Amino acid sequence: MIYSVSGRVIHTEAELAVIECGGVGYACKTTFNTLQQIAGEENAMLYTYMSVREDAVELFGFAQKEELKCFKLLISVSGVGPKAAISILSSMSTNEFALSVATGDAKAFTKVKGVGAKTAQRIILELKDKLAGETISVRGSSSQTSSGAASGSNIAEAVTALEVLGYSEGEALSALSKLDPALSVEELIKKSLIGLARF
């Protein structure tokens, strides 16, 4: 497995960046966001994912670990392939992706070419289920004791979204502990991201 490629940027085009490493040019399929980040740079380092199928071996590269994590989450959804995942992540930032999953905003995904309503709903349902298993300790924490199940659920969903972005559970809980748990999930995430960005 190739973890990353680092070297000279020798070519870019729509959804593709070629990075030269040790005299070999690695063609990495990528997102518009990554292409923007490496635009004008002589050298770049991309975190990679290799897709091996019967008819093709493809390398995908991302400028940020968070974007790679979101890509892996998307291709784990039944019916969502690498091409659709690249299109989705080219149309929204990792912050917007996490927010859309956490708040159940299917319309954000249907705006992407090639993603229908059923696929959008499947993305939200499957990723919420997968991420719920990672936040069991949050759901069972004191955040649900006195303020009610609704606010506790909002905190848990906000933690889930922040974990998608690469923050640890501790960092997410620390940022959320300073906020009113009665806020909507969207507001909790937005305010937490502002607080976390300061550090």
Image (cartoon, rainbow, N blue to C red):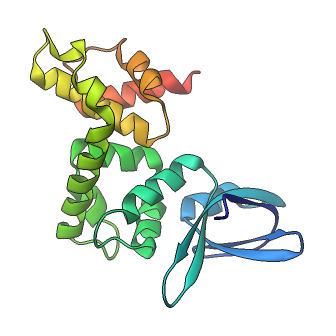
Question: Which residue appears at 23% of the width and 15% of the height?
Answer: 143
Question: Would residue 92 be visible to someone looking at this image?
Answer: no
The location of residue 169, given as percent across then percent down, is 42, 27
In this rendering, is residue 154 above or below 98? above
Left or right side of 156 for 177: right
Above-or-below relation of 60 to 128: below
- Residue 122 appears in which quarter of the rendering? bottom left
Q: Is residue 49 visible?
A: yes
Residue situated in front as seen by the camera: 158 or 51: 51
* Picture layout, residue 193 above or below residue 33: above
Quadrant that contains the N terminus: bottom right
Q: In x, y percent, where is residue 86?
A: 47, 68
In the depicted structure, whether residue 123 falls above or below residue 119 = above
* Residue depicted at x 38% and y 20%: 173
Q: In the displayed structure, does residue 48 sit left or right of residue 175?
A: right
Q: Is residue 31 left or right of residue 157?
A: right
Q: Residue furthest right?
A: 23
| Left or right of residue 2: residue 31 | left
Residue drawn at (66%, 55%) of the image: 37
Q: Nearer the viewer, residue 34 or 158?
A: 158
Q: Picture coordinates of residue 144 (x, y %)?
A: 17, 17
Picture quarter with the C terminus: top right
Please name whichever residue, 6 or 183, is drawn nearer the observer in this view of the structure: 6
Q: Quadrant of residue 76?
A: bottom left
Rendering coords of residue 178 (x, y %): 37, 11
Residue at the top extreme, as displayed:
146
Give the residue displayed 27% in from the left and 31% down from the top.
136
